Image (cartoon, rainbow, N blue to C red):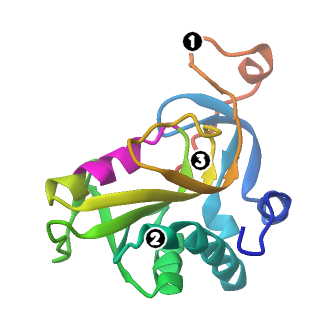
Amino acid sequence: MGGVTRDEILQHFKDSGALLEGHFILRSGLRSRQFFQCALALQHMPSVERLGAALAEKLRGYGPVTVLAPAMGGLVIGQEVARQLSVRFIFVEKEEDNLVLRRGFKIAPGEKLVIVEDVVTQGGRVAETIAIAREHQAEVCAVGVVVDRSNGTVDLGVPMESLLSMDVETFDSGNLPDDLQAIPAIKPGS
């Protein structure tokens, strides 16, 4: 894994306060006992460089010429992966609650790209990003994520590489276990 083990990554998330425990409302509306606030794990550049190098190593063989990331979560790690691969970096961002390609960024037909995100649970934002790339007839070679909360169950229609794959339980708000019903829900944002 490019010199970074799964246990080291998990320990880094714990040490940096990026792995939170409690009752969280995820972007999807589902509830969870754990929340990955990747921004806390990615605030120190030596950590970004190590994680970016490990993820770039997993994506290198796909031969991308561009890294595309959804803002905000994918910005820091996406830019570092692109730097490690010596390729172009662009991003999509929210406009009226939808992701869009702005700022004069262009994607050429047939352009080989990888999409980089910090955390995937159900893959909604990554799927939106893939759809935008395909609207421009790009070739989406793979998706790279730091944390795959689905433990490999999300199918985005392209290969997905992750540094940390975990099976994190999620619950519908109408079907919460007793321990989560007993504590207030927090919507930490992403």
User: On the picture, is 165 further left or further right than 10?
Assistant: left
Residue at x-position 45% and y-position 42%:
123
Is the residue 73 above or below the residue 150 in the image?
Answer: below
Is the residue 180 above or below the residue 42 in the image?
Answer: above
N-terminal of the pair, mark 2 or mark 1, is 2
- Give the residues in magenta: 122-131
Tag 3: amino acid: Pro
The reply to whether dot 1 and dot 3 touch (C-beta < 8 Å) is: no
Instruction: Point out residue 164 in the picture as x, y percentages from the top left corner.
Output: 70, 54
Q: Say which of 62 and 29 sits in front.
A: 62
| Residue corresponding to mark 1 | 174
Tag 1: amino acid: Gly
Q: Is mark 1 on a helix, strand or loop?
A: loop
User: On the picture, is 63 further left or further right than 165?
Assistant: left
Is the residue 94 above or below the residue 109 in the image?
Answer: above
| Residue corresponding to mark 3 | 188
Q: Does the magenta stretch include residue 124?
A: yes
